[in-house]
Image (cartoon, rainbow, N blue to C red):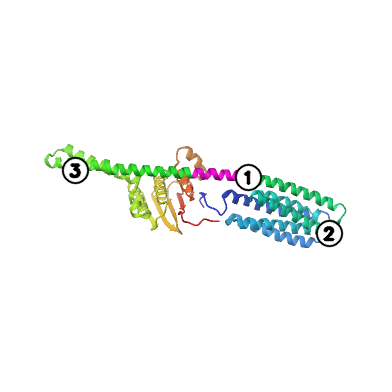
Amino acid sequence: MRPSLSSGFGNLSDPASEAERRIAWLRLIAVPLIIAAATLPHPHPERDAFFVAATVVGAYALGALAWVHVRPVTRTFVFAATALDVAAISVLARLSGGAFSEARLAYFLIPVAVAFRFRPALTAAASIATVTAYLVQAIAHPAGRQPGAGRFIAVQTGFLLWLGLAAVLLSAVLWRRTARVSELAEVRQRLIADSLTARERERQALAEGLHDHAIQNLLSARLELEEVADEVHHPALRRADAALGETIGELREAVFQLHPYVLEQAGLEAAVRSVAQRAARRAGFSIRLDLHCRRRHPHDGLVLAATRELLANSVQHAEAGNVLVRLADQNGSVALEVQDDGRGFDVTDLPGRLAEGHIGLRSQRERIETVGGRMEITTAPGRGTTVRIRVPSGHEPAQS
């Protein structure tokens, strides 16, 4: 399987999903530690029940770990996982010694974990719930009536409260930092979007200027030259006419590259077909098209620009002989795939390729992510390259 490099969507942001995966590993590691602690030499009248409960909690930890690696992480899952963590630790502590159970140490995981998940208010609520759960099971357990148990419970509660306060402060710092980063990212996206819009306007204005003035002037000059050639037969006139024809053709190609009017007149599918066929004729590679996109979208120009860039990469860098272009309308979004049989490359070398000046892929990714899209690159040396792009329409429902 070829490695891929992608940037994608998520029901939670990527950092939040990544934090949940780390917490899932911590949860799983805690289970054998709690079981090991239960084998220490002190009485456990409910040892059998403890091991049954530990098995159930272990299965839950494994299931949660698998879930966060293969399914979207939603806020509902995060809330449920936090509640289940508190309940699981409380049950294991209750069955392995109450206030004196080594499983009580797992309570300290909860405030730290929630600090990376929630806002300060929710972190405080989760910390208070953790302290309450510890107190309830510790006081209700028969070990809570042993000499010195009250003092021990009070000290443990104090530590949990202290850690909960630290978690709230940490959550506040992380939340402010996240909010600031989000604000900067939003400003950056607006600036990039404004820059792209201005650039597209400039390209359109330049294309219109070339078409309405330069090309028309050359066409007029060619007509005048043809009138003269009808009366005066000279090889220089034929050469001049051929040169004018070639120049007009080149200018028309430049106008198409700057601003393909077929996109406005016939839509994205026709524009992609035109761009792909022109690229294939110029470069001499074989092109296969699978295009099914009849609707218009706000970011059709962006998808067309990406198509042009990817086709250019297939020729200039990949030296491909065969290229497949797929385009589809998927639930209001545009899905583009460009696959070639060229040289491919190692995705780990992408930063080096950027340093060498190959910024086309990076530029397209910036544009696509600016509008909330996704770009995935699958490649390997000698095995070709496949680039998949998905650009949502402005009317696509947000994921939650």
Classify 10 Å Cα crowding around label 1: few (below 14), some (14-19), many (20 and above): some
| Residue 329: assigned label | none
The residue under the point 84% across, 50% down is 151
Q: For the magenta stretch, what is the residue range?
A: 175-189
- 72 sits to left or right of 314: right
Residue at the far right in the pictured view: 147
In this rendering, which labeled residue sits more in front, label 2 or label 1?
1
| Amino acid type shown at disc 3 | Leu
- 249 sits to left or right of 93: left
- 92 sits to left or right of 260: right
- Distance CA(mark 2)–CA(mark 1): 41 Å
- Distance CA(mark 3)–CA(mark 2): 106 Å
**Which residue is tagged 3?**
223
Label whose residue precedes the other's in the sequence (3 or 1): 1
Whether the magenta-drawn stretch holds residue 177 is answered as yes
**Which residue is tagged 1?**
174
Place of residue 67 in the rendered image (x, y in percent of width and height, measured from the top left): 61, 57
Place of residue 294 in the rendered image (x, y in percent of width and height, measured from the top left): 38, 58
Classify 10 Å Cα crowding around label 3: few (below 14), some (14-19), many (20 and above): few
**Which residue is tagged 2?**
142
Classify 10 Å Cα crowding around label 2: few (below 14), some (14-19), many (20 and above): few
Decide: marks 3, 2 in contact (CB < 8 A)? no
| Amino acid type shown at disc 1 | Leu
Callout 2 secondary element = helix
Decide: marks 3, 1 in contact (CB < 8 A)? no
Label whose residue precedes the other's in the sequence (3 or 2): 2
Instruction: State the image quarter where residue 316 is shown.
Output: top left
